[in-house]
Amino acid sequence: MFFNGGMDREHMRKALAQNPNMLRTLLGLSFTLIFMLSYAVYANTIDTAYYTYTTDASVSEQSSDSGLAFDRVYDEAASTTTWSANVTIDRNNLTWVNVSAEDLAPGATLTVFDAAGLWTHSLLGIEDARDFSCADDCRLNETTTLEETDGVAVYKGLAVTEPGARSNGTVVAESQGEADDMAAAIVSNRHGSAVLRVTIVEPGNRSTTPALSIEMVNEALSNVQPFDVDVASEFVWALTAVFACFSIVLLPAFAIYAVSRRKERANEAKLAQAEALDDTSTTSTASEEVEENEAS
């Protein structure tokens, strides 16, 4: 950046060696620029149009243990027992609908019906799922049927796929009022169906009621506030970053200056030694000439 071949290096070395004030000037300009740029980074960080909002999730649960009523129908011709239950949905800001059935007979199925449809996928709700995004991969289904595995069937559905509607989020706004309206628009929704129907079909004539649990999650906007940072730590980080950049640029110049000064001092020492030897030699020669003249 600073040098263009050997000539530029030599010119820089001579300039720094002949003008020590240049080093102080470079240092002064460097620290001034470092401080100004650090403040610019810091000011740009804290002066933001970002607002963060939080939501409060309320969970309601209905289960066979808490008195959820089943309708039982035995189909003698098909030799199957059907258990069905209707569950009322809180439609305001509904996000998750989770249905879990246990103690199922081998070959049993769990069917969840919602007239407005729920977004579902086999990987939904799995924490370590890879290459999965419900916004891209989930499908809106009115009816979903799952087969039991080891006597258990679990259904997970979403009323909305927007992540900001079911968790904390961020909006970009010009004012607090605009941020409040934007956050409310993201979180607020009203599900189109008020009833969820759950059906379990088991082979044979079953008299033992399956263990069924239905969990629904509703979100409510809690707080909207400007995004803020730790002022002191952000300024320190900005100062460190800019200082590191300038160090990378300026250290070569300072290193050349130090080397040139060291060489200059060595040359001065050699010159002084040579002058001392020359003075000694001149004095010896003059003494010999005087002695010769006196002898003659």
Image (tube, grey):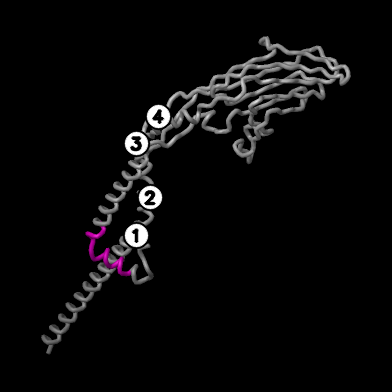
Q: Which of marks 2 and 1 is nearer the N terminus?
A: 2
Residue at point 36%, 59% (across, down): 252
Give the number of the mark in front: 4 or 1.
4
Spatial separation of the CA atoms under disc 4 and disc 3:
20 Å
| Residue hosting label 1 | 255
On the image, numbered disc 4 is attached to which residue?
Answer: 225
Calculate the distance from the C-alpha at mark 4 to the C-alpha at mark 1. 49 Å
Is residue 180 depicted above or below 249 in this figure? above
Q: Is residue 11 magenta?
A: yes
Q: Is mark 2 on a helix, strand or loop?
A: helix
- Residue 232 tag number: 3
Residue 196 horizontal/vertical position (percent): 66, 21
Query: Could you say which quadrant of the image residue 150 lies in?
Result: top right
Question: Considering only vertical position in the picture, is 28 above or below 61?
Answer: below
Specify the segment rendered in magenta: 10-23
Q: Which of the numbered marks, if any, corresponds to residue 137?
A: none
Mark 2 lies on residue: 244
In the image, is residue 183 above or below residue 63?
Answer: below
| First of labels 4, 3 by sequence position | 4
Going by the numbered disc 2, the residue's amino acid type is Ala
